[in-house]
Image (tube, rainbow, N blue to C red):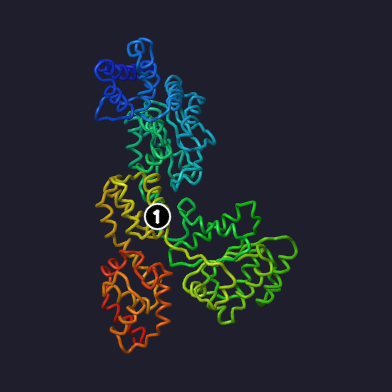
Amino acid sequence: MPDNVKYTYKYASKTIVERELDKLISVCEHDIPIALDRLAEWIKGDENLHPQSSISLMTFSRIRGFLRNDAFSKKYPQHDMFELLLSRIHIPESQWTYIESTAQKWFGVHDTPTADYQIQGIVSDLAPFWSAKVKSLDKIDQGIWGYHLEFPDIHLKYFDEDVIMVVVSDPSVADPQNAPNYFQKIKNHLTDRGVAYKISIVLVLGDGNALRELAKKSSIQIVVIDEKDCISILLSTNSKQTFCSLVARRVSVQVIQPYQTRGKVRDRMFYGRHEEINKLKNNLSSSYAIYGGRLIGKSSLLHKIEQEFQQDENLHYKVCSITAQITTPVEACRVILKDLGIPTAKHRTIGTFGRLMRDYLESASRKIIILIDEVDDLIVQDEKKDYQLFEMFHNLNNDFGERCRFVFAGYRDLARHCMDSQSRFRNFVETIKLGNLSPIYAHLLIEEPLCNELGFNFEDPSLIEKIVEITGSHPNYIQVFCKELSEYLETQKRRKIQFADIETTFENQEFRARVVETFYVNFSPIQKLITVLVILENLGEFTLPDVIKLINEYEPKIPVDISQIYIELRQLEMSFILEHDGSKFKFLHKLFPQMLESREDLYGLADVVMKELKGEK
């Protein structure tokens, strides 16, 4: 670095701190708290109060030295001014000391910008604040280094694997005329390593505005972090969250969108269900049937159970996991045998499957747990064979106990058997009725990804409760709502969530379509008719006699089986459309009737369903 540049950098930093501290001296005698408040605001980067004086890392050691020098301490012996300052910026003295240590290395780079050890020291100091681990270093060019980082604890989608970080130490990168040359070298480095489609970080040891403007126009996802950003991270009481928010604000929400609306959720988006998992792990002698409505999270729970049993070394279970979209019992047996590594050449019947399984379990002290997802079709097919397969499963579990366990996940047909006191399932499995999330986990699913990952914040905490009410704590509805909300706010170029944003998302057709989709996916024709008639009658609560009366009044010619209607109402409860309190039913999702009525012609729909029930075209 030329001497004049070094001098300017040092002199500017010294001039800024002395100017601000001179202001402190001038008002100290009159009002020490106000003086310290202004100093704290300047340190934290309030540019409205100090538009011309951006703090540098080198300022920190000078501030402590000034506030604790002998002359100042003797003048105000009744106060530890530095301690009072720390209390205003809410960090311990050890954190300030760490910042000073980083600052010394940072400033040393300006003296020797090509020294590898200086760059290594800075990156090693910053990495813990980002919750990152430094893996390797590559020299790219003069004043440019490349690092591999791991982010094991950070929830950003594209940080699941290694992240490339490029460090630029040459201060001339701040010049808009020089920046394009540096940016091209960075792009080449990322492209050569095949990570141009992921998020990468560029750390500028100085002013990164010129590179940041180029990154905004680039197709490569590059987040530029400079000295000012590092100060905000180092001063934060939650540095990981500050870092995540900083990254999120500079990348499209769609790129790092944590919310999923289809399929099994990623581990980091799995909230709640710990009670169900603990039940399976603590009661090792039992098999289980998990039933619930569509999109309630059965597959995600089964996947989590699989991970828990594979990773817990104390359980010693071999896990066999299949999705029973295979509808024939014989084929399901073949898949299980194959997954367990049992030769299937002799397998022809369910009886053969049973003998092969017994040989496998008796040959060693093996323990297996068999997880079968989407089991309904398999139940229907096995029902035609007098439940030969599930009888075999029951016998294996009965004879081998905790060494051979089964966990089934399903919907309507599995629930039907679990609710039927005469079903063979009743003596075979413990049942888990999977419902909506508890309030605490519904809040976490809303707040943690929105605030900690995407960098949004709520204008009022009560808005979180409003989302819980709108979604009814249904995990999939929460994911859809928050996805639409976050992407809407990005179009508004805002990170503060207001009441009007909640209202707008509630009216969002994508969200309403997902809720109303439940009506078509979950409901039988008679359940559709019951729902439509209850909504048209505007009944907040209703009983079985109320429903019978509505159907008879709507179409007197249709035969009504009271026991069947009761079963249909219980299945609506199982689908988490209704909840049952004594003799009364009501909608679990309070706003569901309103959303359905706003999207559908309910009178026309009732006529269509009635024709279907009567066998008319």
Tell me the residue that label 1 is attached to: 439
Q: Left or right: 428 with respect to 216?
A: right
**Kind of residue sitting beneath label 1:** Pro
Q: Is residue 179 above or below residue 407?
A: above
Q: Secondary structure at mark 1?
A: helix
Examine the rendered structure and indicate whether residue 318 appears above or below residue 598: above
Residue found at x 53% / y 61%: 302
Q: Is residue 599 above or below residue 85?
A: below
Work out whether residue 615 can be spotted: no
Residue located 57% across and 60% down the image: 280
- Quarter residue 48 falls in: top left
32 horizontally vs 446: left or right: left
Q: How many marks?
A: 1
Residue farthest toward the front in the current orientation of the protein: 582
The part of the image, by quadrant, that contains residue 437 is bottom left
Q: Position of residue 201 (x, y in %)?
A: 43, 38
- In the rendered image, the quadrant that contains the N terminus is top left
Asked whether, in this view, residue 381 is left or right of residue 89, the answer is right
> Residue 581: where, in percent of width, then height?
39, 68
Confirm whether residue 569 shows in the render.
Answer: yes
Residue 16 placement (x, y as % from top left): 30, 20
**Which residue ends up furthest to the bottom in the rendered image?**
557
